[in-house]
Structure formats: C-alpha cells, structure tokens
Amino acid sequence: MDDPTKVALNRLLDEHHQALTAALGAVLDIDAGLREILRTGKESSLDGPSDTP
C-alpha cells in the first residue's frame, strides 16, 4: 500500500506542475504575440510612411 503522505505530496506536486505549465504557456503565447507585433511594425516602418494617420 502507498504511503498516504507520498500520495498527497505527489498530488500536490502534480497540481502545481499543471498550474506552472499552464501559466508558462500563457506567458510564452503573450511573448510570441508581442514579438510578432514588433516584427510586423518594424517591417511596416521599413516600407515607408503610411497614408493613414
């Protein structure tokens, strides 16, 4: 039979691992989105001035 303390610890670690993985994924998605915006903006500025204000 498994030690109840080990079972509880493993459950707690699994929950924290899942939360960390989800949070890290969100941060990486935001980072990728910001990089894409900056890259697109830089390319647009290289094309010359825009006609829209």
Image (cartoon, rainbow, N blue to C red):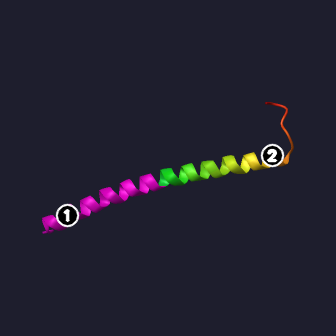
Q: Is residue 53 above or below residue 42?
A: above
Question: Which of marks 1 and 2 precedes in the sequence?
Answer: 1
Q: Is residue 14 above or below residue 49?
A: below
Q: Which mark is residue 24?
A: none
Residue found at x 80% / y 46%: 45
Read off the residue under disc 1. 7
x, y percent for residue 24: 46, 56
Q: Which mark is residue 45?
A: 2
Q: From the viewer's perspective, is 33 left or right of 13?
A: right
Name the image quarter holding the N terminus: bottom left
- Name the secondary structure under disc 2: helix
Task: Name the amino acid, label 1.
Answer: Val
Q: Is residue 43 above or below residue 52?
A: below
x, y percent for residue 47: 85, 45
Q: In this picture, which residue range is highlighted in magenta?
A: 1-24
x, y percent for residue 15: 31, 56
Residue found at x 55% / y 49%: 30
- Name the secondary structure under disc 1: helix
Q: Is residue 20 magenta?
A: yes
